[in-house]
Image (cartoon, helix red, strand yellow):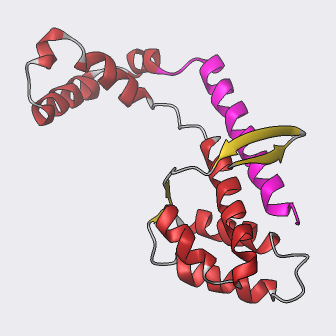
Amino acid sequence: MKNTLNIFGTLILYRNTEMVIKLNKGLKKDLAIVIGNQFSSVKLIKINTLKSQVKTFLEPLKTLNKKNTKLLQKLVPKEFESRVETAVNEFKVVQGLKPKRPLSQYMNFSARKSKETEFTKLSFSERGKEIAKIWNKLELKDKTKFNLSKKEYGKYDQSMSTYQSALKTLKTNKH
């Protein structure tokens, strides 16, 4: 079954996905808001009570998967279970937009050095120790060579702002 999500006037088609999301405290709060918004037009359900039940349910969880979604659906009357699934799927789509943070100077340096033949023969832990020694001996001006370009940071910032806007849109979207 295909569903659609409207972000910035763009319809995104998605299937019920098996994507697993690692949940942190902020994402749990955001998901509770998104689920609560699905019920803004339903008079039978007290939204604040539902949000607190969702937060309580999510508290011990570390991931959001299909099994946990089914359990979340049990918090609402049977005729409204599809709204919970819709909210979770929309949330997963938006989470898929979140960009990965760019590598730090040290991680760029380490990635390049790890590919050199003298380090490929070492074990992972030995390689890390040797690379760290070399890094600590480098001058500050030599370390700056491993900065990301402004273009790469700009691309990350743009992707992050798109993600944050999509999340904000999803959290304020009332159904």
State which region is magenta: 147-175
Residue 23 higher or lower than 142, as above or below = below
Residue 1 higher or lower than 160, as above or below = below
- Residue plotted at (61% across, 65% down): 26
Q: Quadrant of the C terminus?
A: bottom right
Is residue 153 covered in magenta? yes
- Residue plotted at (74% across, 40% down): 13
- Of 173 and 110, nearer the camera is 173
- Residue plotted at (37% across, 30% down): 107
Left or right of residue 29, residue 49 in this image: right
Residue 94 lies, in percent from the top left, at: 68, 48
Dominant secondary-structure state across the stretch colored magenta = helix
Left or right of residue 3, residue 153 in this image: left
Residue 80 lies, in percent from the top left, at: 75, 76
- Residue plotted at (59% across, 37% down): 99
Residue 92 lies, in percent from the top left, at: 62, 52
- Of 81 and 143, nearer the camera is 81
